[in-house]
Image (cartoon, grey):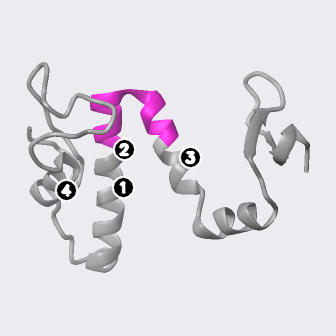
Amino acid sequence: MESDEPGEVLFVAAQSSPWDNDDLRGPFGVVSFLCYATFSYWDEGDTWETQWDQHSKDVQHAANEYFRGPRASLLALLNAALSSDIRHLADRLNVCAIKVNRNEPGERSWTVELTGAGDQPL
C-alpha cells in the first residue's frame, strides 16, 4: 500500500494468513520481510542504523497489532523493556514475579511490586 507519510508502515495480509498465529510463524519471517520491503533511508535525518532500528521497532509493533492485536503489542513492549540489567538484578535478588499495578483507574502512575520464592514480597 502507498502512504503519504515517509517511513510509515502499511501492509495488508490475506485472510487466514500463515503468520496469523501467536508466534508470527510462517514460511518466512514476516517482520524481517516487511522491514526490508518498506525501509527507506532519509539522508537528512539520523544515521542509517538509527533509522533502521526505529523502523524495525515500528514494523514489529505494526505486525503485532495487525496479526495479534493490542495485547500482543503490549506484551512485546513489556518484554522488550525487561533489559538484561533488569533480568540480571532480578536473578541476583531471586525475584520470581514482577507485578505492575496502576495506582488509580485511568491514572498514568504505576507501582511495581517484586515477589520472591514462596510468594514473599521483596
User: In 3D space, how far apart are the residues under numbered discs 3 and 1 (Cα atoms)?
Assistant: 13 Å
Task: Describe residue 110's horizontal placement relative to residue 69 as left or right.
Answer: right
Q: Dot 3: within a 10 Å radius of its alpha carbon, few (fewer than 14), some, or many (20 or more) residues?
A: few
Disc 3 residue type (three-letter): Leu
Q: Position of residue 86 (x, y in %)?
A: 68, 63
Question: Which residue corresponds to mark 3?
Answer: 78
Dot 4 alpha-carbon crowd within 10 angstroms: few under 14, some 14 to 19, many 20 or more: few
**Which mark sits nearer the N-terminus, 3 or 1?**
1
Q: Is residue 74 above or below residue 57?
A: above
CB atoms of marks 1 and 2 within 8 Å:
yes
Position of residue 72 relative to residue 61, above or below, is above
Q: Which residue is mark 1?
A: 57
Residue at point 32% right, 48% down? 60
Q: Which residue is mark 2?
A: 61
Of the residues shown, which amino acid type is indicated by label 2?
A: His
Q: Which residues are magenta?
A: 61-75
Location of mark 4 (residue): 32
Secondary structure of residue under mark 2: helix
